Image (cartoon, helix red, strand yellow):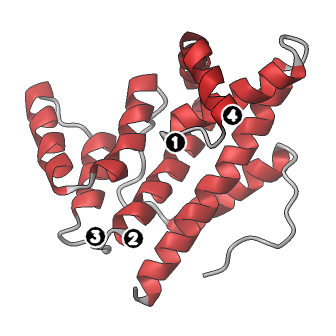
Amino acid sequence: MGFIDHYLARIGNHTANEMKVAVGLGLLRRYDGMYRQEFASFLAAAVVNRVFCEEAAQPDASRFLAENRELVEKEAASLSSDNSLCYLLTCSVYLHCYSRHVQRGGKHGFLYNPYLGYIRALSHPVDDWTTYNEICSRFEEKLDHAVVEPLQSLLQLGIFRPLPRNPNARDIYSQVHLFAVSQGVKFQTGPASG
C-alpha cells in the first residue's frame, strides 16, 4: 500500500471510530433515565452498529439485538431528525467506506474512481429517478458490497446527507474530532496526522 492508500485507510478508520464513540456517548445520555443502564448501553451499541453495518462483538449483544431489533431500527432512524449529526455521520461513513475501498485494492484519486463516482451520484442525483438508479447500480456493480453497505444503510435510515463534490478527508476528520470532543470523548493522543 502506498502513502496515500495508507493515509486514507488510517484516517478513514480513525474518523469512523471517533464517530462511533461520540454517537454512542450521545445515545447513552439520551437513554439515561429512560432505560436501565445495562439496557441503555446495549441499545446505544446496537444503534451504532446498525448505522455502521457492523456485527455485535459479544454474544450478549447479539442476543440483545435479536430481542430488540424493532427498537434498534426505530432508534437508528430517529437520528435522521438531526441534520448536523446526519451530515457528520455521512462524512464519517464516507471516509470509512473509502478506507475499505482502498484496503481492498480500489483506486483513489479524482479520475476514474468508481467509489467517488458513486458518492457523487448519491450526493447529486439527476432529475430522472430511473437514470439515478441506473447510475448508482453501475457504480455498485464495480464496488465491493462491504464498501457500499454502510452508505446504503444511511440511505435506508434517512440519515445520508449530500457531500461536496470533492470531500476533503482531513477536514472531515477535524469536524468529527471536534464533535467527538464536544460529546465528551477523551483521547490519549492528539488527532491523526497525515
Of label 2 and label 4, which has the lower sequence position?
Answer: 4
Question: Decide: marks 4, 1 in contact (CB < 8 A)?
Answer: no
In the image, 33 versus 164, the foreground residue is 33
Which of marks 4 and 3 precedes in the sequence? Answer: 4
Mark found first going from the N terminus, 3 or 1: 1
Label 4 sits on residue: 45
**In the image, what residue occupies the spot 41% across and 62% down?**
100
| Separation of marks 2 and 4 at Cα, in angstroms | 25 Å
Report whether 12 appears left or right of 135.
Answer: right
Q: Position of residue 122 (x, y in %)?
A: 30, 41
Label 3 vs label 4, nearer the camera: 4
Q: Give the spatial CA distance, label 3 vs label 1.
A: 21 Å
Image-quadrant location for residue 70: top right
The residue labelled by disc 1 is: 54
The Cα atoms of the two marked residues, 3 and 4, are separated by: 30 Å
Whether the residues at callouts 3 and 4 have beta carbons within 8 Å, the answer is: no
Amino acid type, callout 4 = Ala
Whether residue 82 can be seen here: no
The residue that label 3 is drawn on is 106
Disc 1 crowd rating (10 Å Cα; few below 14, some 14-19, many 20+) is few
The three-letter amino acid code for the residue at tag 2 is Gln
Residue type at numbered disc 1 = Glu
Residue of label 2: 103
Q: Position of residue 133 (x, y in %)?
A: 15, 33
Q: Residue furthest bottom?
A: 2
Q: Secondary structure beneath disc 2? A: helix
Quadrant location of the N terminus?
A: bottom left
